[in-house]
Amino acid sequence: MLTILDQVSLQVSHGERIAIIGASGAGKSTLLGLLAGLDLPTSGKVWLAGNELTALDEDGRAALRADEVGFVFQSFHLIPSLTALENVMLPLELANHDQPREAARAALGSVGLGERSGHYPRQLSGGEKQRVAIARAYVVQPTVLFADEPTGNLDQQTGETVIDILFRMNREYGTTLVLVSHDLVLAKRCDRIIQMDAGHIHIPGQTDAGMDH
Amino acid sequence: MKALALAWRLLLRDWKSGELTVLGIALVIAVTSLTAVAFLTDRVGHAVELRAAESLAADLRLGSSQPIPAEYIDMAEQAGLKTASMIIMPSVVFENDRSTLSAVSAVSSGYPLRGRLKTSIQLLAPATETTDIPGQGEAWASTRLLARLGADTGSVIRVGTADFRVTKVLDFRPDQGWRFVDLAPTLLINMADLESTELIQPGSRVSYRNLFAGPREIIASFKPELETLLSAGEQLRDIADTDPQMRSATERSGRFLNLASLVSVLLAAVAVAMAARRYAIRHRDRIALLKCLGSQQRFILRLNLFQLFMLTIVGAATGILLGFIAQQGLAWIASELIAQDLPAAGASPVLLGLMTALFILCGFALPDLIQMGKTPVLRVLRHDVEPPPMRYGLSYVAGAVAVLALLQWMVRDIKLVLGIAGGTVGSFAVLGLAGWLLVKATGRFRGMAGVSWRYGLANLNRRGRESVIQVVAFGLGLMVLMLLTLVRNDLMETWRDSLPSDAPNQFMINIQPHEVPEMQKYLASQNMQVPEFAPLVRARMTTINGEDVSQITFEDPRGERWAKRESNLSFGDSIQTGNKLTEGQWWEAGTENHEVSVEADFGRELGVKIGDELGFDIAGEPVTATVTSFRTVEWDTFQPNFFMFFSAATLRDYPASYITALYAGAEDDRKILELMRQFPSVTVIDLEASLAQVRDVMDKASMAVQTVFLFTLLAGLAVLWAAVQSSLDERSFESAILRTLGASRARVLTGVVVEFLAIGFLAGLLASIGASLAAWHLAVNVYELPYQFSPMLWLTGPMLGMLFVGSSGLLATWRVVTHSPLSVLRGV
């Protein structure tokens, strides 16, 4: 069996912004997957918003994600058959929101895409796609936002615009931000940097892998 | 509720964005073709039934030796049925000093309720259809009657105590039949004149008939209602009881139509399965994202089921509507050719359309959608994470069972359903094996051609499993298309040829033994065909294995009817032309044993087997014979045939008359008329009209089959389309990569074309083999027709395959290479 993460212990406080950096294959995305409850560790425990993720089943973790978590991905993961507006509406609809269309329209407006709400992902540029993804992540006002290489597929300038929006919304909503990136400049805008190397974390401190707010 | 609303919204959005186009259209084509087939089959089937009903002159015919109670007729009229009555009695009619026995038939207006009378203004004049009946004081006489009396129209003939003027020659009445009933020639008079003839006296042999006709549903409910009231002497007949000739033609046409429906169902299932696979593959990301956004497994399952259900309803509704419209158009085209309005379609195809959509989607799309629901949420981070591999073998068992159940429900002929299913499974296995061999073989040819060829063939090899699936899909589609062409051309022709244009149309019975040589001499002198004369002995069956037939409980009601009525027996040394032995052995010529060969269906209805002893009463004397063989008879050849044929030793010492059948063209009418005059005791039955009736049924049925196959062809195209679409995403991506790497558009295209051509070639070759074998099986085992292998097929198969698959591949991938490779790559 291959060991991807070993002896990892990490605590993130409510409202904190942390960056996880490291070389390819260092285990950044795997750690992110574990923190968000997308995957389970073979041993060890993970807490999210006071809940022990590792003690929950798939559906329990899904319910927790629905309540607490937002995501932004490197490859955007917009649904190609839905328009920008419909993509942003989706998490609202899943949460039985009263007026998903209005809330989604407002969220799109706040990332500067109010005019393009009827466009399909294939009609949008990379930066625009990522802005739609950010709007989708924030529209449910999550407690924690996980961002996996959010600028990885974007050029520098577009990347910076997107990051500005990400941080601005983080401030507005007081969201905890867990960001995975190669980009040291981007990482430095966070409160704390966690350096990963071959499955290990290079920071002094905690004994349990966990996260509270 | 949340899942329901979301499912509907996602479905709408998918449709709007084009994601559902392939699946949706495949489903709609499937339902459209199937319901159009069902609607049309329903209507044409009904038209064929109506045509068959003409041989009864009604949908239902009640016969009795006593007057028919008026309450029956009131009941029918209240139910909205048309009625007419007919009274038939044998009577000698006179014209001057000549007289002959005639079947005097008095009819009320409206007769016949189905079919038309044909009359002419004098002997040998052309006949025309009429909706009238003879007026009061008038009589319409059959050709035979006039020939025997030496009379023509204008003569006055005496019937009982009344005189009638013959105003028309009765050439044809739809219910005249040709079996050994109504032997005397017909004289048709008006019911109002019957009393004046004073023919009906206590003890006279009178046969009362009442005819009923009307809409199918009313007939269907009226028949059982009437049956409960009938007394012992009253016999109700519908078209199921008509002549074996007519039954045979109707049953066959039904089978041809069902074949078309069956093929549509199978094709539809294949097309939907392919489209669903593609949909599921493309929507794994969405499922992972929904889970990432907090949707639970149960919710996802509900979402998928709701979507499936909605797709079923929408697809079925659209398909049924389109099917109805298409069928209207077809019926219009068909009615031009059939020259008769088709009856309106029933409602049962609506249910069929709905059930079909449900069965097909559940059997063939559900497994993929459930599998799609199992996509791990981790896929949002790592794109190579996929759902656990699907156990297709197991999941499609459900689909196969669903389709089999549907087929059985539609066709109610388990032999045909299993035959088709077995053939399909066999074809899948053979095509799969051959596809695998092709994939293995291409490895050897890769180095022998240029880079495009190498790329194309390498593709084939690399996508081994997918290539095999495509060969199987294309092969099956082509096989079905070719089978349809074959069935349409070869089988239909063979079937129609089984009733050649010179089939005997003059049946002659009551020929006395001494008249046989004289008649042969007469026919030869007139340069007419001299046919074989078969001896005929009338007998009544008394025992089976010593047991009195009146004491036997027959499993088949038809068997009971056969056993209890007078039979026509024949005898000879050799088996009659067109008969085939199915069991047992024919006797040696000149044997002194009492043996009998029994027609196979008749034997089954009677419940007898080889070695059973049948007892008969012939003119008061008991005769027994042992069943030594069974044989099949081609009833629709119109040769004189017998349910029971005996060794000569059994019957030669009993009084026999002879029967024969020959073909007479229109130019021979006068010779036949002269024959009737020379041999007045011989009964000549003109079968031309009955033959035309059977031919017409065949023509109608074949017309229906051809139009119905048009839809099946559409379903076949849907399969091809779905197959090409299913590999399109992957091909788009690869072509983009190749072009990015510097391959020219032409080179990429050539590679793709080579790959599709190779798939098409093998699929076509296999389709040729499969179609030939299937057509042979259908012809020989199902339709009981001879079959010849067609060499053209072996050339057309691969050509068609390469043309179809090559051009489809080219068309589908054309978009890929004309698009900027960057847009394809960025879209990933």
Image (cartoon, rainbow, N blue to C red):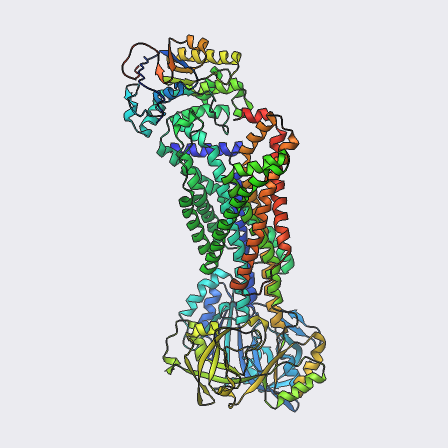
Q: Residue sitting at 37 percent across and 8 percent down?
A: A191
Q: Position of residue B800 (x, y in %)?
A: 62, 48
Total number of numbered discs in the rendering:
0
User: Of B155 and B99, which appears nearest the observer?
Assistant: B99
| Residue B101 appears in the figure | yes
Q: Position of residue B545 (x, y in %)?
A: 38, 81
User: Of A117 and B341, which appears nearest the observer?
Assistant: A117
B13 left or right, relative to B516: left
| Residue B139 appears in the figure | no
**Quarter of the image where the N terminus of chain B is located:** top left
The picture quadrant where one finds residue B245 is bottom right
With respect to residue B686, does A67 lie above or below? above
B392 left or right, relative to B522: left
Q: Residue sitting at 46 percent across and 36 percent down?
A: B280
With respect to residue B412, does B204 lie above or below? below
The picture quadrant where one finds residue B115 is bottom right
With respect to residue B53, does B196 lie above or below? below
The picture quadrant where one finds residue B622 is bottom left
With respect to residue B326, does B746 lie above or below? above
Q: Position of residue B14 (x, y in %)?
A: 50, 33
Q: Position of residue A63 (x, y in %)?
A: 33, 26
